[in-house]
Image (cartoon, grey):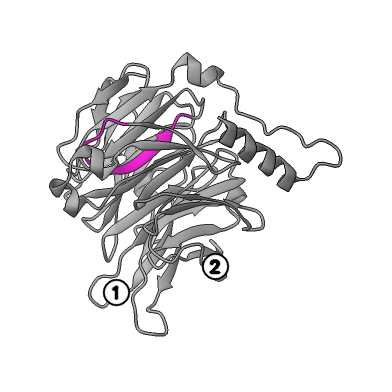
């Protein structure tokens, strides 16, 4: 599996994202300039120039007409995807950490960090596609304040996603919690704690029936979206920065590595900067892909399941096309137990086989 190396950013990568059709790849980094690439050959089609700070997140609408970016310069910008021109800038009180389009692409939501006396906030903006951009309001339609917790600690949001049919806003936090908010009233609908440490990233499958969280507590967890039931846990020996669900196979891709500040003291081999492949059902690791010289910050898998992209602290994006052997690979199915045979007997048989080997 030979990767296409995308060299267009000067600093570490923060986000990589395929559009709905999988023919474009959008990337952003700490160098202020998001880029868009053709996935077929790795050609850079253009950049979106205008931000003055790190781009923490971006999202592209369903038909790849408009892009929204979230930046540390305390603004979110709406871009025309085809021309690269900035349609409108939405000013926030603090650095903007995340942005997400709603179903229908007529509104988007952002999350911003606390700044001086302003609390962290979730904002929902109306941007109807058929309306004149000059008619878009500067102020959000809904603004949800995220005050300090009862013990006086500030809790910062890390990711935001709209659930199906825009029923709720799904927000992850740096204390390991996930909250659901009503996008029209701003009311908190639910809160639960999948992790003990910061949730770095959350990603959904295409139908938004499953989601996987990646955390600094060395685990990634798979949940059912409907009843928020915990299904699987994928354990590693390093912080997990991103995890994605394959659309065509029962596989999970995990990316991470030790923290960036301690990278210079170790070699690439020790730092464990590879993409790791886990089986979705059995929770077992069955392969890895090396190549980066720093922790992987962002992963994305093409909706057609034929390629994936990884972006790392080293400033490179690697676009991998899967080999035919991987695409044709059949997942192992555990042998069915004979009638009257229980699992303990089978385990004993396996152990005796391994001893005889």
How far from the left and from the top, in percent, is residue 284?
A: 52, 41
Q: Residue at x 22, y 33 (%)?
A: 316
Number of residues whose C-alpha sits closer than 10 Å to that of mark 1, classed few (under 14), some (14–19) or many (20 or more): few
Residue 106 painted magenta: no
What x and y, as percent, mark residue 214? 43, 52
Residue 146 figure quarter: bottom left
**Residue identifier under label 1:** 118
Question: Which range of residues does the magenta coloring cover?
Answer: 290-302
Depth order, front residue of 156/48: 156
Q: Is residue 329 visible?
A: yes
Q: Give above or below for 85 relative to 181.
A: above
For the C terminus, which image quadrant? top right
Tell me if 328 is positioned left or right of 143 in this view.
right
Query: What is the residue that sits farthest to the bottom in this orientation?
Result: 151
Q: Earlier in the sequence, mark 1 or mark 2?
A: 1
Q: Secondary structure at mark 2?
A: strand
Q: What residue is drawn where x is 29% and y is 37%? A: 311
Q: Are marks 1 and 2 in contact (CB under 8 Å)?
A: no
Front residue of 240 and 336: 336
Q: CA distance from mark 1 to mark 2?
A: 25 Å
Return the residue at label 2.
Answer: 192
30 up-or-down from 73: above or below: above
> Is 295 contained in the magenta span?
yes
């Amino acid at each position: 599996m030979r990767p296409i190396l995308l060299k267009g950013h000067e600093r570490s990568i923060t986000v990589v994202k395929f559009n709905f059709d999988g023919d474009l790849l959008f990337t952003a980094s700490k160098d202020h300039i998001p880029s868009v690439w053709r996935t077929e050959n790795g050609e850079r089609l253009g950049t979106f120039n205008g931000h003055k700070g790190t781009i923490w997140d971006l999202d592209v609408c369903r038909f790849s007409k408009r892009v929204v970016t979230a930046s540390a310069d305390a603004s979110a910008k709406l871009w025309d995807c085809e021309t690269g021109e900035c349609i409108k800038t939405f000013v926030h009180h603090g650095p903007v950490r995340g942005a997400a389009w709603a179903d229908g692409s007529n509104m988007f939501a952002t999350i911003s960090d606390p700044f001086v006396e302003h609390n962290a906030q979730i904002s929902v903006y109306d941007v109807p596609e058929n309306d004149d951009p000059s008619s878009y309001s500067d102020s959000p339609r809904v603004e949800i304040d995220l005050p300090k917790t009862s013990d006086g600690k500030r809790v910062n949001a890390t990711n935001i996603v709209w659930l199906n049919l825009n029923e709720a806003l799904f927000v992850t936090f740096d204390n390991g919690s996930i909250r659901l908010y009503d996008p029209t009233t701003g009311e908190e609908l639910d809160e639960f704690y999948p992790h003990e440490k910061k949730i770095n990233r959350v990603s959904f499958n295409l139908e938004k029936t499953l989601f996987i969280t990646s955390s600094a507590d060395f685990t990634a967890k798979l949940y059912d979206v409907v009843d928020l039931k915990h299904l699987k846990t994928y354990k590693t020996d390093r912080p997990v920065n991103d995890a994605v669900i394959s659309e065509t196979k029962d596989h999970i891709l995990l990316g991470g590595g030790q923290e960036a500040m301690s990278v210079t003291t170790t070699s690439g081999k020790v730092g464990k900067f590879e993409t790791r492949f886990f089986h979705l059902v059995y929770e077992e690791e069955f392969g890895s892909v090396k190549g980066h010289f720093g922790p992987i910050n962002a992963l994305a898998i093409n909706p057609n399941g034929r390629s994936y992209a990884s972006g790392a602290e080293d400033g490179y994006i690697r676009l991998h096309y899967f080999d035919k052997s991987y695409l044709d690979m059949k997942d192992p199915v555990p042998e069915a137990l004979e009638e009257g045979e229980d699992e303990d007997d089978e385990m004993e048989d396996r152990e005796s086989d391994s001893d005889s080997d």
